[in-house]
Structures are given as structure tokens and as C-alpha cells.
Image (tube, rainbow, N blue to C red):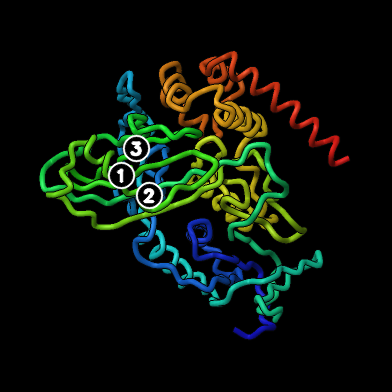
């Protein structure tokens, strides 16, 4: 690419999920008159990850979904809950069709590609010079959407990680129920500090993504992941001597009450996790990335600045911070917390809450369903932590 090229919009790190969703949203609005560049050293294709989300059927993603379920399970050692999500459903999207759809959107929109790693974004208030890691100018953009992972603006009071390993298991015998996904199965051995659970997305009665997930302050090693998955697949009735692991997926997602800088300068906007799209209490990100992409595209189509709204209401971010604090200090256990949440609320309310789509009166109902004394103590500790942080900054 000519280093003096000028574009209206640059997607930095645009080959990942957030950038792909933006490209497809721009394509839906037929913004062919917009000069767009994608700056990313990697051209992603194939099946390298899986996203899951809930919502109503009939969205633009319908043709590329791998599977969806009206019912999900949440299981603890005490009971198994089978939850009817109607009118919502839980859906799975694998990366290959999303990457292919984004590549087709690039072609129709006439996007310019720059296969380079970005080192700096120099924003002078009227435009942004995008530079490589050696400081050379790659292009100048009216706006930059930056979806690269980045640190928060300042450390959080609680900083955990959602980390997981998933096996795509093909069983020789029917062992999975293709009519329902397993959202959380807490029968896995619980870590000394943190929460663990199993997770199953079945494509058929013999083929499913089986994951072991932890919410915890630190990662575990490969041997621990594999041992946990062997134990969980046995619990599901999978005979690994007669089954095959076709693919392996790994992931690490921040779970923190730290604030992320959604707009670090006048014409740079962050998307994805660095733009606040990850829900601190669960690590869910995909639905918020879709909202960000839709809002960016709608704003550009209307001639407005491409700045999406905050991914979650402020009161939800506060509630997430309190929940993380209660889990971190051991005042409440993960199986108890999530079990009560689904026991004492309609599943649709819980899912809409986790998606940031509930009204204040519904939020109060969610709060009442959590263990009162531990959460009150965590709320007091959270308030004290906020006050100390303000005094320290001042």
C-alpha cells in the first residue's frame, strides 16, 4: 500500500471477530462510497475459534450458524436444570463462515488491505496517521476502529481470567443430546480459588464441542486442561478409546472491573474487549461486538461519527464488579451464585441481564436472587475500594 493513501475509515486488527462484524455491517448498509482499509498482519480463515451467543432467531447470522438450541442445561452437584429459552435461543457460530462473509464484504466494499502490524496511531484531531512498528506511515484515516487487544486504562480492583480448552469430540456412539446445550456444568472439580465448569455445544448426538472452563486469577498448564477434559468427557459418558478429538480450541478472556478506554483519542475508537465488549462477570463478548458493529455502520450511513454506545449500562458494570469481588474473596461460591441466579429468575431475564438488556426493576430482581449477606459485604468493599482509588488519583 502507498504510505500516503488516505481513507475514510481504517480497521486496525480488522481480521478478527470485531472487525469482521463491522465489515459485514458496513456491507449491509451498502457503504460502497466509503474508502475503507483493513490493517492486520494476519489474514484469518478456517476454523480457529467458536463464538456462542443468545438472541431471537431470524438475524442476519442465521445462514452461517452451525447450530442453535431452545433449551440449555445448568447443572450443579445438587440438581440439573433444563431451561427453556423461548423466545430466545442459544446459537453457535464457527469462525470460517464469518471470515468468508467478511472477505466477501471486503470485495464488495472495495476495501484496501495492508498486511502490517501497527505500532502507533497518531491522532491530530482531524485524522489519524497509522504507523507500523518501525514508525513508518502506512496510511492516513479520518477514523480508526481499533480492535486489537489492549490493557485497561488502569488496574481493576479484581482481575480474573476466563480461560478454557475445548475438544471437538466425535464419539463412536450416541452420547450427546443435540436438542440442548450445556451452558454450565459445575460437577467438575472446583479450584482452590475460582470457579470451574463444563460446557457442551452438540452439533449431533455424536459430535460436540466439549469445553473445560475456569474463572480464576491465574492460568493452568496444558496437562491440567487435558486431565480436566478427560475427566469431564468420562462424566458425560464419552468413551475416549472409541472417540476422536478432531480439533482443539483454547482461549483466555479478561474478567475485570478495570475500565477500558473506549475512545483513547478524538478519532480512534476501540472495539471488542479493549472497547469494553467483554462482560466482566461471565466473559461473554460476541453479542456486544455485534451491537458495536451495528451502531458503527448505522452511524456512518447516517453521516454521524462512528462511535458506539457503551456495551453495558453503568449499573451492570457496578454489579459485575461486586460479583467478581464476592467470588474473589470466597464469600460466595460460583456454583451457588449461578445456581441461585437461574433458580430464582426466568432464564430469559438472566440471559438478557448478562447481555445488558434488562430494565432497572429487573436488575433489582436479579440482585435479590443472589446471596444477600456476602453480596452486601462485597458491595461495601467495592465502595471502599472506589473511594480509596479516587483519593489516590487525586
Residue that appears at 59% across and 28% down: 329
- Name the N-terminal-most of marks 1 and 2: 2
Q: Nearer the viewer, mark 3 or mark 1?
A: 1
Q: CA distance from mark 2 to mark 3?
A: 10 Å
Circle 2: element type: strand
* Mark linked to residue 165: 2
- Give 362 or 335, whichever is nearer the viewer: 335
Image quadrant occupied by the C terminus: top right
Q: Which residue is mark 1?
A: 229
Within 10 Å of disc 3 (Cα), the crowding (few <14, some 14-19, many 20+) is: many
Circle 3: element type: strand
Within 10 Å of disc 1 (Cα), the crowding (few <14, some 14-19, many 20+) is: many
Residue that appears at 10% across and 43% down: 173
Position of 347 compared to 323: left or right?
left
Image quadrant occupied by the N terminus: bottom right
Q: Position of residue 132 (x, y in %)?
A: 65, 76
Question: Does residue 244 appear anywhere in the picture?
Answer: yes
Q: Position of residue 182 (x, y in %)?
A: 31, 35
Q: CA distance from mark 3 to mark 1?
A: 8 Å
Q: Position of residue 222 (x, y in %)?
A: 38, 53
Circle 1: element type: helix
Residue that appears at 52% across and 22% down: 332
Q: Position of residue 142 (x, y in %)?
A: 71, 68
* Mark linked to residue 118: none
- Name the N-terminal-most of marks 3 and 1: 3
Q: CA distance from mark 1 to mark 2?
A: 8 Å
Residue that appears at 70% across and 21% down: 380
Q: Which residue is mark 3?
A: 198
- Give 390 or 129, whichever is nearer the viewer: 390
Do the residues under discs 2 and 3 have CB atoms within 8 angstroms? no
Amino acid at each position: 500500500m502507498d504510505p500516503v493513501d488516505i481513507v475514510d475509515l481504517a480497521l486496525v486488527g480488522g481480521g478478527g471477530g470485531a472487525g469482521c462484524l463491522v465489515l459485514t455491517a458496513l456491507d449491509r448498509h451498502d457503504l460502497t462510497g466509503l474508502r475503507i482499509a483493513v490493517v492486520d498482519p494476519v489474514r484469518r480463515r478456517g476454523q480457529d475459534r467458536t463464538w456462542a451467543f443468545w438472541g431471537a432467531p431470524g438475524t442476519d447470522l442465521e445462514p452461517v450458524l452451525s447450530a442453535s438450541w431452545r433449551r440449555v442445561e445448568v447443572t450443579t452437584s445438587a440438581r440439573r436444570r433444563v431451561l427453556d429459552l423461548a423466545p430466545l435461543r442459544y446459537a453457535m457460530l464457527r469462525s470460517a463462515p464469518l471470515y468468508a462473509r467478511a472477505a466477501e464484504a471486503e470485495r464488495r466494499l472495495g476495501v484496501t488491505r495492508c498486511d502490517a502490524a501497527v505500532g502507533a496511531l497518531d491522532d491530530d484531531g482531524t485524522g489519524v496517521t497509522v504507523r507500523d512498528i518501525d514508525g513508518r506511515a502506512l496510511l492516513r484515516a479520518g477514523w480508526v476502529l481499533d480492535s486489537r487487544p489492549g490493557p485497561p486504562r488502569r488496574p481493576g480492583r479484581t482481575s480474573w481470567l476466563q480461560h478454557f480448552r475445548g475438544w471437538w469430540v466425535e464419539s463412536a456412539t450416541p452420547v450427546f443430546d443435540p436438542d440442548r446445550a450445556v451452558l454450565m456444568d459445575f460437577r467438575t472439580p472446583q479450584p482452590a480459588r475460582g470457579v470451574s465448569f463444563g460446557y457442551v455445544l452438540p452439533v449431533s448426538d455424536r459430535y460436540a464441542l466439549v469445553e473445560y472452563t475456569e474463572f480464576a486469577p491465574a492460568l493452568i498448564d496444558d496437562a491440567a486442561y487435558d486431565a480436566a477434559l478427560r475427566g469431564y468427557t468420562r462424566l458425560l459418558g464419552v468413551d475416549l478409546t472409541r472417540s476422536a478429538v478432531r480439533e482443539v480450541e483454547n482461549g483466555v478472556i479478561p474478567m475485570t472491573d478495570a475500565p477500558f478506554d473506549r475512545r483513547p483519542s478524538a478519532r480512534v475508537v476501540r472495539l471488542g474487549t479493549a472497547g469494553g465488549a467483554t462482560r466482566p462477570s461471565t466473559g461473554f463478548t460476541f453479542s456486544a461486538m455485534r451491537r458495536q458493529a451495528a451502531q458503527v455502520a448505522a452511524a456512518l450511513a447516517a453521516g454521524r461519527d462512528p462511535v458506539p454506545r457503551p456495551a453495558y449500562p453503568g449499573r451492570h458494570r457496578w454489579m459485575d464488579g461486586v460479583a467478581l469481588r464476592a467470588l474473589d474473596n470466597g464469600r460466595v461460591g460460583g456454583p451457588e451464585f449461578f445456581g441461585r441466579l437461574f433458580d430464582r429468575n426466568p432464564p430469559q431475564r438472566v440471559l438478557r441481564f448478562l447481555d445488558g438488556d434488562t430494565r432497572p426493576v429487573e436488575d433489582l430482581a436479579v440482585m435479590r436472587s443472589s446471596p444477600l449477606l456476602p453480596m452486601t459485604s462485597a458491595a461495601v468493599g467495592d465502595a471502599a475500594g472506589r473511594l480509596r482509588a479516587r483519593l489516590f488519583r487525586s
